[in-house]
Image (tube, rainbow, N blue to C red):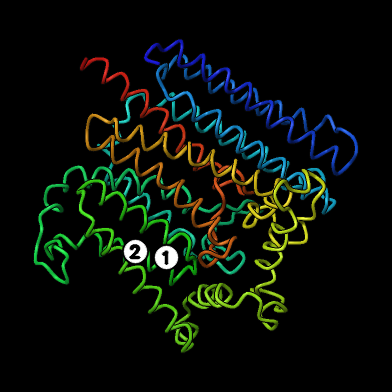
Amino acid sequence: MRNPQKVRGVEAWLLVVAWAIAGGAIMMTQLGALGAIDATVLYLAGGLGLLTLAVHIVLRFVAREADPFLLPIVTVLNGLGIAQIYSIDIANGHEGWAADSIRQVAWTALAIVAAIIVLVVIRNHRVLTRYRYLSMFAAIGLILLPMVPGVGSTINGANVWISIGTFSFQPGEIAKIFLAIFFAGYLMTARESLSVAGKRILGLRLPRMRDLGPILIVWLLCMAVLVVQGDLGTGLLYFGLFTVMIYVATGRREWIIIGMVLVVLAVGVMFTLAQTHLSEAAGLGLGRASDRIDIWLNPFDQELFEQEYGGSGQIVRGLFGMAHGGMFGTGLGLGRPAITPQAADDFIFASLGEELGLVGVFAILALFFILVTRGLRIGFRGPDDFSKLLAVGLAFVIAIQVFIVVGGVTRVIPMTGLTLPFMASGGSSLLSNWIIIALLLRLSDSIRKTQEVDA
């Protein structure tokens, strides 16, 4: 599909299918829960459809050769998320601005507009290499912002939010984009030195000690996020992002092993300190992460289950909800996902598992798989190191978030504070992930044009 008109034509037809799936899901939710169709919500969903159409039109002018599959896939995921959140709102009796689904529609509209702005302003992704160190300082500033007195706020035990009046936002979601830009720019220049092998220890050819500095600094930064802010998921996301990008840059498996060892070491130290209650004395946030590890290991413990806050009731109810959904689910609007705490955000995957069943969640995971592989494909086709690393980094951000969220809900790993991209309730996550898609679209267009010029 080297013909730009054919590429955009494929995207247009897939968008029609995406609108049908998203709109059909909302109508099925209404029929299942209310027995009637409410035109107001459909009008709002239609407005989002017009915004995605606007993205398609913008691509026809500013990125004619962009990947045709990214926009339809995220449209389906976003639409299904709104339908599921709407089902939970109906069960809780929430209407108007008090309903998470209405706020999700508003945040989606803002996120799509932000994606359009990124596509229009950034005409060539290589310009971002000039701002790699500025991106580093921006990321660090956003990560530290919740710790500023009077601005930061603690929600559900994690100090990763900023609040201004009734408005709350998670700046760490935007920080991951700046980190990906910085890592790509830094590794583009430091790839050769990081590829140099040092001494062999336990059968592994380790890097030179002076080259371990950057990864140790990033490790310390991520652990500071974990320790001070009490957010296990964000710390793992940041460190996982850098570890994968440095592996892609150097091609050396030793970096993956080093990264895994550092993560295990950090979690072990954290858990030990939390058990000795030293973290509370120092005012650190390790207790929350330690509790989540305890819940992961002993979810069916009666004492943990009956805890009013921070117990295992959430994950146990989520597991039983997915079990109730079975193979094909109860049907949209016909389940009882609302009995699980935070069913619209942290446990949206469990809610979808109950109403769509195993077949439904497998289809959703397949969409995420296609989305990530398209991003990786864009990176592997990149003509330069920066293009490869940035595309791989952005795609991996989505991949690791999906793994951490789904793994936590299904009890493969401890629960974290991350949200399922494009589906869970939350404006900061929606905004950052739509910007990521815009950057991948820009990358794919620039790479295709570069290949045509070279040919």
Q: Dot 1 corresponds to which residue?
A: 225
| Identity, as a three-letter code, of the amino acid under mark 1 | Val
- The residue carrying pointer 1 sits among few (fewer than 14), some (14 to 19) or many (20 or more) residues within 10 Å by Cα, namely many
Q: Quadrant of residue 52?
A: top right
The answer to the question of whether label 2 and label 1 lie on touching residues, with beta carbons closer than 8 A, is yes
Q: 78 or 228: nearer the eye?
A: 78
Rendered position, 302 above or below 209: below
The answer for how far apart the CA atoms under marks 2 and 1 are is 6 Å
Measured as percent of width and height from the top left, residue 418 is found at 53, 56
The reply to whether residue 404 is in sight is yes
> In what quadrant of the picture does the N terminus appear?
top left
Direction right: furthest residue: 35
User: Residue 220 location in percent, x, y?
Assistant: 31, 67
Marker disc for residue 321: none
> Which residue appears farthest toward the front when viewing the image?
327
Which secondary structure lies at badge 1? Answer: helix
Q: Which residue is mark 2?
A: 221
> Label 2 is placed on what type of residue?
Leu
31 with respect to 61 (left or right): right
Percent across and percent down for residue 81 are 66, 42
Residue 98 visible in the snapshot: no
Residue 333, x across and y down, in percent: 80, 45
Left or right: residue 327 versus residue 428 is right
Task: Find the residue positioned furthest to the bottom.
Answer: 276
Question: Which residue is pictured at 37% across the width and 51% down the height?
Answer: 139
